[in-house]
Image (cartoon, rainbow, N blue to C red):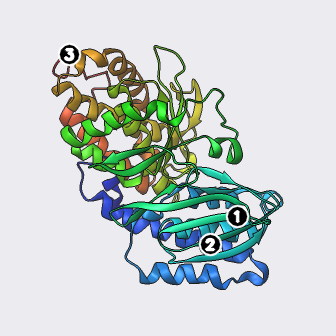
Amino acid sequence: MDVFGLFAHPYVGDYHSLAEQLAPNLFRSFCTRAIKEQPGGSDPLLESFIQDLDQRPATAAYWTPEQANIVLHLQQSTQMRKDPVWLRTQIAVAAHLCGLSDSIHLSATLNNEPLLVRGDALSAAAIRIEGDREHLRFTDENDVLIAAYQVVHHHGDRPIWQRTDRPTPFITVDGKPVIPLVGTDWHHHFTEQGHADTPKPSEGVAAIQAAFDLLQQKIPEYHAWILCFLREITCIPRPDADSIASNSSGVRWGGIDIAAPASVTEIVEMLVHECSHQYFHCLYWLGPLATPEAGLVFSPLKNQKRPFDRILLGYHAFGNALLVFDRLKALGYGPSMVDRVETVNHYMAALAPPLVHTEKLTDLGRAFYEPLRDRLFDQLGFGPGSLEPTLSAHGAPS
């Protein structure tokens, strides 16, 4: 179990290799479940994806919102699940987008049930999909174009797709497009988290790019940490001038929401916080992080009792934020972070005490928790026996 401690924070070790092993295993397991829903309990196309997974190098590229949309379907009750044709089609699209399949030629009657494709919800009564390794095209039953995509870059082994008929902005790394800023189709079509008056993606791109550049140049450990699992960003409205908001979901792998407008340091915090959640979500699908007896614990974030593993979820994200705050403070950003440091210290002071009861965590949960607990104590003096806020925005830990 100790290997899963690599997901505690970026200084533990080679978390990327672990992500490369886990992501295809999750895709394989959900493909296996999906095959059982197909007529006769078999499907040559889906079975070919499993065979391809076994033959190709492991990669974290399989961690995508499209994959998670399959999970979202499989979580529903049998009566609420979509038609097996939709499931088969969504898996085929997901496999192609992450580079598992070399080509796709598929026609399906979907009855306007939307497919998730790189942040877009695409729907038609019947849909035709044609693509190769560099192109992907969706048309309806009348051969009218719905959407078209093209690979514009490869970030490592992950193809980066751009919608050619309606381009969207990207966050770049070394001048190359890597993370698209997408709209709220996922929120409106696949959850009940739709946002009114959502900023246009382009409105947040400059500040988000500045945050990425700051991390790459000055805190590269967290730049790599973020990029390991991040696949797309949606800008959401800022609640008010004195607070920020960000979101992620266990059924939107690699997709996060961050508030706009926001300062560079606020965006760094939101990126680290939400991308840290991705590591929790990945482990969550392997097994429980808290014991069945752990019960509910009051959460200062939600102002209500929540499952014990949700306390760990918050502690992990805010703990990593404290570590990056410490680096930002050393770079001279302390005066602009006073309010956020105070807020996160307040949250951590409430989240840390319940986790002293490590017997409420499973072996997986302890492996995830303990390296971060130890790092916070070593770097900031925050830990067992010292459960008060420890990081000052102005100077050394206080």
Whether residue 107 is visible here, answered yes or no, is yes
Kindly report the distance in space between the C-alpha atoms of the residues bearing marks 1 and 2: 9 Å
Vertical relation: 144 (above or below) 253:
below
Find numbered disc 2 in the image and state the secondary structure of the residue it sits on: strand
Label 3 amino acid? His
> What residue is pinned by disc 3?
394
Kindly report the distance in space between the C-alpha atoms of the residues bearing marks 3 and 2: 56 Å
Asked whether the beta carbons under mark 1 and mark 2 sit within 8 Å of each other, the answer is yes
Asked whether the beta carbons under mark 1 and mark 3 sit within 8 Å of each other, the answer is no
Q: Report the quarter where the C terminus lies.
A: top left
> What residue is pinned by disc 2?
130
Whether residue 383 is visible here, answered yes or no, is no
Percent position (x, y) of residue 233? 48, 42
Of 136 and 210, nearer the camera is 136
Horizontal side of 391 relative to 94 (left or right) equals left
* Disc ID at residue 273: none
Front: mark 3 or 2: 2
Of 7 and 223, nearer the camera is 223
Callout 1 crowding tier (Cα within 10 Å): few <14, some 14–19, many ≥20: many
Query: Which residue is pictured at 24% across the width and 51% down the height?
Result: 12
Query: Which residue is pictured at 54% across the width and 70% down the height?
Result: 96
Front: mark 1 or 3: 1
Horizontal side of 387 relative to 81 (left or right) equals left
Percent position (x, y) of residue 281? 49, 51
Callout 3 crowding tier (Cα within 10 Å): few <14, some 14–19, many ≥20: some
Horizontal side of 52 relative to 31 (left or right) equals left
User: Mark 1 vs mark 2: which is more N-terminal?
Assistant: 2
Percent position (x, y) of residue 304? 60, 26
Asked whether the beta carbons under mark 3 and mark 2 sit within 8 Å of each other, the answer is no
Label 2 amino acid? Glu
> What residue is pinned by disc 1?
139
Vertical relation: 56 (above or below) 109:
below
